[in-house]
Amino acid sequence: MDGKKGITSPRETYDPNPVFFLVIEKGVSFSFPFMVPSETDADKIEHLLELGLDWLGIGAKTASGYGTFEKENAGKRHISGKRK
């Protein structure tokens, strides 16, 4: 027994209760659309987004390899008309 009041810590020999979490299959593509006033701002946002997704990832379990992103279509940018 660990601690006070007869509380025991979980052990490998106990029957575990699995904890399920949602995942997205490998190979799924995402796009992150932004409206920006200039091409310079678009470059800055693209750089910061890449840095954040590469360094931090998104969601839980990033330390275990989940939530990581790989850039595809390098340099490909969808440009549309200005919104007024």
Image (tube, rainbow, N blue to C red):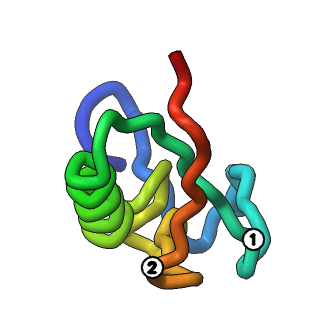
Q: In this view, does 37 lie to the left or right of 59?
A: left
Task: State the residue at coordinates (33%, 66%).
Answer: 50
Q: Is residue 35 left or right of residue 55?
A: right
Distance of label 2 from label 1 (alpha carbons): 19 Å
Dot 2: few (<14), some (14–19), or many (≥20) neighbours within 10 Å? few
Q: Is residue 21 among what the camera can see?
A: yes
Task: State the residue at coordinates (40%, 61%).
Answer: 57
Across and down, in percent, residue 20 comes to 74, 52
Q: Is residue 52 among what the camera can see?
A: no
> Label 2 amino acid?
Gly
Front residue of 44 and 55: 44
> Looking at this rendering, what residue extends furthest in the top direction?
84
Vertical position of residue 36 compared to residue 55: above or below = above
Across and down, in percent, residue 65 comes to 47, 76
Which is closer to the viewer, label 2 or label 1? 2
From the image, tell me which residue sits under label 1.
28
Vertical position of residue 35 compared to residue 47: above or below = above
- Residue 75 is labelled as 2
Across and down, in percent, residue 79 comes to 56, 54
Task: State the residue at coordinates (70%, 68%).
Answer: 29
Front residue of 38 and 74: 38
Task: State the residue at coordinates (49%, 72%).
Answer: 69
First along the sequence among labels 2 and 1: 1
